[in-house]
Image (spheres, rainbow, N blue to C red):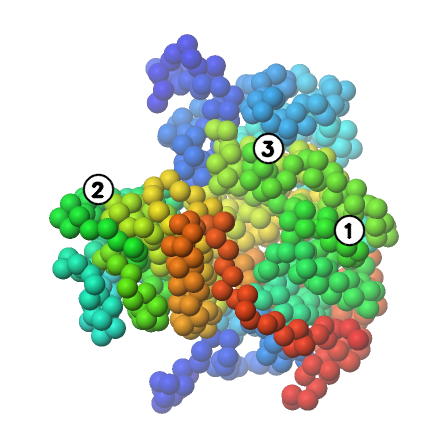
Amino acid sequence: MSQDTPKSDIPKPNKSFPTHPHAEAVTENAWSKLNAFTDARIGLGRSGISVPTKHLLAFQLAHAQAIDAVHTQLDSDALAKALVEQDWAKDWAKDWTKNCAPLLLHSRATDRATYLQRPDYGRRLNDESANKLDEHRVSTSQDYDLAIVVVDGLSSLAVEQNTLPFLQALSSHINGWSLAPVCFVKQGRVAIGDDVCERLNAKCVLVLIGERPGLSSPDSLGLYLTWGGKVGLTDAYRNCISNVRPAGLVYQEAARKAFYLLNEARTLKLSGVKLKDRSDDDLIIDTSKESKNFLIS
Amino acid sequence: MSKPNSTFQFKNTVGERTFGFVDLADLMAKATPARSGDRLAGVAAQSAEERAIAQMTLADVPLSLFLEQALVPYEEDEITRLILDDHDKAAFSLISHLTVGGFRDWLLSDLATNEVLIQIRPGVTPEMAAAVSKIMRNQDLILVAKKCHVKTAFRNTIGLPGHLSTRLQPNHPTDDLTGIAASILDGLLYANGDAVIGINPATDNVQQATRLIKMMDEVIQHYEIPTQSCVLTHVTNTIECIEQGAPVDLVFQSIGGTQATNDSFGFNLATLAEAQAAALSLNRGTVGNNVMYFETGQGSALSANANHGLDQQTCEARAYAVARKFNPLLVNTVVGFIGPEYLYDGKQITRAGLEDHFCGKLLGLPMGCDVCYTNHAEADQNDMDNLLTLLGVAGCTFVMGIPGSDDIMLNYQTTSFHDALYARRVLGLKPAPEFDLWLAKMEIFKNNEQFTLNHQLPDAFHKSLNRMIGGRS
């Protein structure tokens, strides 16, 4: 890239690339324009029978971004500070107790390498965090309808990008619910929400967690709802909403689905396999737009 | 280090120190080359020395002990019953005098020809295969696997020596037919898809599976491709698809090595028998009758909390007893998909891939490998290049082929269409012979011997392509 290239013209992966010399060594594919119909890496062309340089490097960039999403530490302190400064959060928090400041917690996994190899450590709070919650409970003796637990999981990027916009979208739905202080957990897995839920004596828990990053989606947030979360519950007791991000399930939609499940859970006093997501039952599926198989006919 | 104690079935004194192992399962687990999943299960050796001593101790165990001491109780587990009830004593008689260590020497020796290895297959149990693999180096696993020829067939012939097949894996996050068709076209034009065209559906139900099965059947018929299709949905869904008249070629199921694992997957041996019979009744194979496609992977038993205190590689080998009962066309160990809590890095993934391929082949399975990794494992494309090359040398039956190594539905990386051509070129490995002829006929390959692709778009695909992008250029 030349030095005077404007910053905004930096090529994005998959879309445009710098050209390399010896382009005649690359055989382009006549069908490369089919990439308009899929995000799959089709029609890459070939250098001999190998992947051309520009696509090799684009792949490596995508992999690098995914690795960084896994290994970059979540700055939960900054995220918690940003949350309390939001106008909608001040509104939203008016029913909170005076001890409503977000709580910063940590799992039993001391570092990322341990976290990746010991999922059991990532499901439990460390002693300091457990004590913090126990003290909160003693000092407030408050019961809560809902605990929101924000967990780094496998993508701190997903948590940093999507937490505040999603919570803003959710905030208008849950007026009147008594909310526990929002908890931010580092080196956590989904089930750590149960540990939090039980210690805060909340009726249910909504976990926001960074999902395992894909090459094309390093920023995907997952939502997990458990009614009566307590240590030892399996996934059969949880409801999941996946792929929350601007290019996936958008915030308003995710918030609508999450609130549907929260409300159903509160009505039925359960969650998991017995709680079906029928939030889309009213939608009419238009099969006339069903794509045809262009390879035949 | 463990202290000598009467509760130990096996003891080994080296110098001043005595190491004890509670039972055969404990000895097997501690003799297993290091991996994160066995540490997570709490069954791994506590030190490198304990592991080496366990391997020495295991080497002295007679093969016949595996017939006397079931690692999972016979009464509790239908896979143990399958292994012991189907064991062929006559076939075993050739190796019945051997210890695990002696078995390694015998397998490596010139006594163990392809013909002899076929002869002993029904006498080898998964536990014997797992045990000997634990004391074999990577080159041993490659050398012996290469001697084990396993041929299967449906619309083409898979597993001939000097051949490597590929599963074309055109997954799409919303199962969009145009997106899937685009990936199928890409794969076929890169000479992939002779093992199977196999889709992991994003929406897993009977209706969706039927839609995808029909779509692939139309493509295979239209272009007269000597290959087979499969939708990787639950076995009970496929049975329903067949009942509703869907054109099912292969029945898929993920399988594990303990009954409790398969319970958690929602099937048992009777379910598989029912599915196999249903698929056979359609009689859709043209050159053979192998109608099952199984996937496995180390760690699935622990993940289902159903490992009975066994190490993950022994559980994996026991899954092959399930597979061989149903004469599959393809068995695929999805080695790096499960994540770093089971196989931490490229080194562990590579070792596991070679172990699985060896054990599968020794037991007579058409063993392929999904050479793959997730973004939270300590692995990258270079690790995959290495394992692909090693498996190609070992005579692996098939690998995956996917556009640009990136599965946009399952969010992991596996081998690409380009990677398969690399393996063909450096190792001289041909596709299934019927498919190879088709590639020549369709002018996809310009030169089948050199694995050279045509520069021009083959005529047969012009019309389809113009329909999609004719107006767009």
Distance from label 1 to label 3 (Cα)? 27 Å
Type of the residue with mark 1: Glu
Protein chain holding label 3: B
Quadrant occupied by the C terminus of chain B: bottom right
Q: Are marks 2 and 1 on the same chain?
A: no
Q: Do labels 1 and 3 share a chain?
A: yes
Q: Residue at the front extreme?
A: A267
Residues tagged 2 and 1 counted as in contact (Cβ below 8 A): no
In the rendered structure, find residue A173 and report the number of the disc placed on it.
none
B458 is higher (above) or lower (below) than A269? below
- For numbered disc 1, what is the local secondary structure? helix
Q: How crowded is mark 1: few (under 14 residues within 10 Å), some or many (20 or more)?
A: few
**Looking at the image, which residue is at 34% across and 41% down?**
A231
Q: Do labels 2 and 3 share a chain?
A: no
- Residue tagged 2: A127
- Residue tagged 1: B243
Q: In which quarter of the image is residue B407?
A: bottom right
**Looking at the image, which residue is at 50% across and 49% down?**
A273
Distance from label 2 to label 3 (Cα)? 38 Å
**Looking at the image, which residue is at 39% across and 63% down?**
A259
x and y, in percent, of residue B44 in the image: 42, 31
- Residue tagged 3: B259
